[in-house]
Image: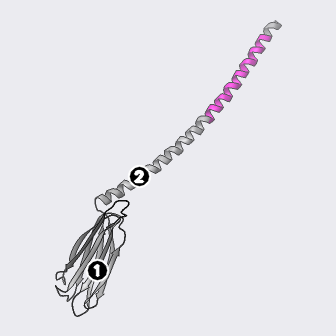
Amino acid sequence: MSGKKMVTRSVAVAVGLICIILVVSLVGVTAYYASALGGKESAIQTDDNQLTALTSKVENLSEIVNVDELDFLLDQNEVVPPKQSLNVYELTKANYSGFIVIQLWGYGVNISSTWINVVWGLRTSPLLYGFNVNYNETRIIPYFQYQPALEYFPVLQNGYFNVILGNNQTQTITVEVRVSYYY
């Protein structure tokens, strides 16, 4: 009988060691997968943040493509002395392509004696692109005492824009000027 007890003890020790190994393995595998799951959750959160940022950029670009954005660049009265001109607005670098609307209201201003000069364009390095665009036009403003005179001009991304108001009269004029930038 003592031989039989010995086999049983050996089996019991072997089964005990196997159980210990299985428990340790189970704890190790659980820790590994818990760590991997935490890393995946972090990756999912990062992807969600990137998706939110990209969605915001798409919405902003859609507004730009549809010319839904508007900035009022200037809205004030300008006093122009007789036989002189006044630089009323200068945009040195446009962020987006679009157009500028200039609205002018004058009181007691003669039709043929008030003018606006607009210079706009794009200057680039000849080494990079090799082209320059420049537009320079003077327009006589029609009589605009009771409703504004409207002038529309394109604006190029990274371009410039300059508005000069002139007075050919012999008296000082006051003109309300509003410059709106649609992009």
Residue lying furthest right in this view? 2
Q: Quadrant of residue 99?
A: bottom left
Q: Secondary structure at mark 1?
A: strand
Question: How dense is the environment of label 1, judged by Cα within 10 Å: few (below 14), some, or many (20 and up)?
Answer: some
The quadrant of the image that shows the C terminus is bottom left
Report the predominant secondary structure element of the magenta stretch.
helix
Q: Is residue 173 above or below residue 140?
A: below
Q: Total label count?
A: 2
Residue appearing at x 61%, y 33% in the figure? 30
Residue 125 lies left or right of residue 17; in this view the side is: left
Percent across and percent down for residue 10 are 77, 14
Is 63 a magenta residue? no
Picture layout, residue 109 above or below residue 48: below
Rendered position, 26 above or below 138:
above
Q: Which residue is mark 1?
A: 164
Residue at image coords 39%, 55%: 57
Q: Which label number is shown at residue 54?
A: 2
- Frontmost of labels 2 and 1 is 1
Image quarter where the N terminus lies is: top right
Type of amino acid at the residue the image marks with label 2:
Leu
Q: Position of residue 36 (x, y in %)?
A: 57, 38
- Answer with left or right where residue 10 lies relative to residue 64: right
**Where is residue 93 drawn, in percent x and y?**
37, 69
Q: Earlier in the sequence, mark 2 or mark 1?
A: 2
Q: CA distance from mark 2 to mark 1?
A: 40 Å
The question of residue 11 being in magenta is answered with: yes
Q: Amino acid at mark 1?
A: Ile
- Going 29% across and 75% down the picture, which residue do you hit? 179
What residue sits 32% from the left and 81% below the top?
A: 87
Contact, mark 2 vs mark 1 (Cβ under 8 Å):
no
Categorize mark 2 by other alpha carbons within 10 Å: few (<14), some (14-19), many (20+).
few
